Amino acid sequence: MPIPTPGPGQVLVRLHAAGVGRWDLLERDGAFARGPARWPSFPHVGGSEGAGVVVSMGAGAAGLREGDRVYGVVPQRTPKQGCHAEFTLFEADLCWPVPPRLSMDQAAVLPVDGALAWQGLHEALQARRGDALVVFGASGGVGHFALQFATNLGLRTLAVASGTDGMQLADRLGAEAAIDGRRRGFEREVARFADGRGVLALLTAGGQAAARLLAVLPAGSRAVWPHGVEMEARPGADVHAAGFGPRYRPDAMRAFHAAARHGPLMPHVSRRLPLQRLPQALDMVARHHLGRLAVLSA
């Protein structure tokens, strides 16, 4: 494919790395192409987030210069020129300078899961210093970011992670306590953490384990989960529970970027594969892994 040309308000970026998430797997398998309004046109380049170096800019793309290290998000559009490529176009107000402490692959996995974690805590849960928070799926993409934002907010956190390695990651990221969500009876430890008082809960996965967690939340608790998480169970009327969707509007993403820049926030990239091995990276998304996966194009 030809290298794209930036239009008004766009920047052309030579990508160094791109994130690989569950949404990319769903996109590949056609889950987003339901109905004629969303049917993709081809060629279609997947990948919703990435990081690289600015090559050129269109008219009105203010605030950036050629050679700047940036990361950004590509919203749904047809035809899509995404980040699983060597070059992509970012809207200038949907990309930001890479924080100096981060590598390109770390910055590449920030926009989608990082923004979901930030919006889940700040907007959906309206968390405040001193609140108690349960993060279900704490060793995954959204969860491991949520733990770090919670620490920065001064929340008490219980991490429900996957396996011993997931618990160890949650400990390193500042969780007050970490338990294995695969272990039978883990929900009793959630109830002990709540101690009969209302808590906040961010659920990044569904299924029976999530249903058991919801069932033990005390009255006055608030639980949220990102849209796309299959949540069949519902708690009692005295527990507020709802899904929330990502907002990639420039104002919301500016607030997220400010929080990511000031940190401390450290994305955990557990596997890095060359772009040529994107099919294998997509298959890995469905298997156990910590944090995020990335593909490298440079």
Image (spheres, grey):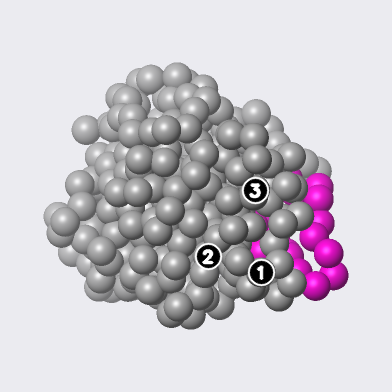
Judged from the image, the secondary structure of the residue bearing numbered disc 2 is strand
Question: At 45% across and 19% down in the image, what residue appears?
Answer: 280
Disc number at residue 63?
none
List the residue tagged with mark 2.
133
Q: In the rendered structure, which disc, 3 or 2, sits on the residue that comes first in sequence?
A: 2
Residue 235 on image: x %, y %: 80, 60
- Quarter of the figure with residue 264: bottom left
Question: At 47% across and 32% down in the image, what residue appears?
Answer: 163
Q: In the rendered structure, which disc, 1 or 2, sits on the residue that comes first in sequence?
A: 2
Judged from the image, the secondary structure of the residue bearing numbered disc 3 is helix
Q: Viewed as shown, does residue 15 lie left or right of 101?
A: right
Q: Viewed as shown, does residue 257 lie left or right of 182?
A: left
Q: Residue 158 versus residue 110: which sits nearer the camera?
A: 158
Identify the amino acid type marked 2: Leu
- Look at the numbered discs 3 and 2 and tell me whether their residues touch, using CB distance below 8 Å: no
Marks 1, 3: nearer the viewer: 1
Residue 237 is inside the magenta segment:
yes
List the residue tagged with mark 1.
196
Judged from the image, the secondary structure of the residue bearing numbered disc 1 is loop
Q: Residue furthest right?
A: 237
- Quarter of the figure with residue 277: top left
Cα distance between the residues tagged 3 and 2 = 14 Å
Identify the amino acid type marked 1: Gly
Residue 159 on image: x %, y %: 48, 52
In the image, residue 160 sits, relative to residue 166, either above or below, namely below
Region of the chain picked out in magenta, as a range: 223-243
Residue 66 on image: x %, y %: 17, 58
Q: Residue 206 versus residue 163: which sits nearer the camera?
A: 163
Q: Quadrant of the N terminus?
A: top left
